[in-house]
Image (cartoon, rainbow, N blue to C red):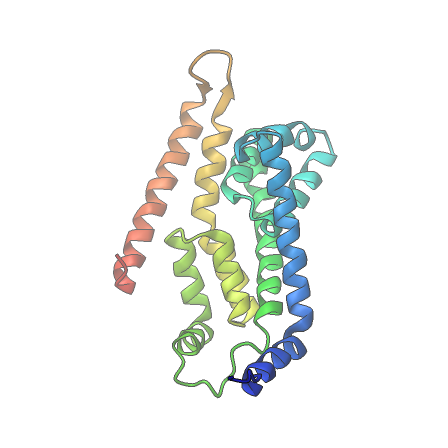
Amino acid sequence: MVQETNNPSSVNLKGGLIKNHGQKLIALLFWLILIGVYQWVRIRNGLSPLQVVQGMLDFISQGLWGPLIYILLYALRPLILFPSTLLTLAGGFVFGPVLGVFYTVIASNISSTIAYFVGRYFGKDVLREDEANNLIQRYARRMRDNSFETVMIMRFIFLPYDAVSYLAGFLSIKFWPFITATALGSLPGTFAFVGFAASIESFTGVVPTVNPLTLGVSVGIFILSIALSRIFKKREGLN
């Protein structure tokens, strides 16, 4: 008869994980529950993300409170992984090209800041400098050494918006280069999507009525942003 014995290293590993990262595990569980509740409510009511935005339009359109509600919703959006593009389009449709860009730039940078610090909280003490040969650690050092350029390239080549923010925080790159590169690198896409939505004047017919000038400018900026993304992809040797 073989007597079962506990593996001390396994017990120590579990105990150390709970001791060192217990608060993070609780916070992660709470975050997953928050995402799960949102998805459960959305699916239970048969709503797509686009329909969720359509339901928000009335609140966003409410006079003086509209911009504040829009900025608040946009800022908290990363916590439930809600697509930024849909809210950007809603901002352009409700507020027009000028105010739409203004409010979206403010809101998107607040949301990036929140995602960055959430990522930083979960990444703290996870990557240690003594793991010098670790692939992730080497990539983290590269991002830290070239924070502005790396984040700018990520924004220009349209990598997932929130994923970049969470990753930057998790890898503990410097905040000010991150937020500056985010603000500048996101401008072409913001102008393009806000302008596209702002060009829609009405939905009275089968085909929406659009403002050709606003639409043309937004399409031009979008083409420019695609060209910039291709230049940066080629520069970095990305496919």
Q: Is residue 212 left or right of residue 35?
A: left
Q: Is residue 170 left or right of residue 206?
A: right
Question: Looking at the image, which residue sits at the far top?
Answer: 205
Q: Is residue 3 left or right of residue 231?
A: right
**At 50% from the left edge and 64% from the top edge, which residue is drawn?**
167
Q: Nearer the viewer, residue 205 or 227?
A: 205
- Picture quarter containing residue 238? bottom left
Q: Is residue 52 left or right of residue 59?
A: left
Q: Nearer the viewer, residue 54 or 221?
A: 54
- Picture quarter containing residue 45? top right
Q: Count of labels shown?
A: 0
Q: Is residue 108 above or below residue 43?
A: below
Image position, residue 60 (x, y; %): 66, 33
Report whether residue 75 is seen: no
- Picture quarter containing residue 96? top right
Quadrant in which the C terminus is drawn? bottom left
**At 48% from the left edge and 44% from the top edge, which residue is drawn?**
190
Q: Nearer the viewer, residue 98 or 115?
A: 115
Image position, residue 56 (x, y; %): 64, 32
Q: Is residue 137 above or below residue 208?
A: below
Image position, residue 129 (x, y; %): 49, 85
Q: Nearer the viewer, residue 54 or 149?
A: 54
Image position, residue 153 (x, y; %): 38, 60
Report whether residue 79 is seen: yes
**At 41% from the left edge and 54% from the top edge, which residue is drawn?**
159
Question: Looking at the image, which residue sits at the far front?
Answer: 1
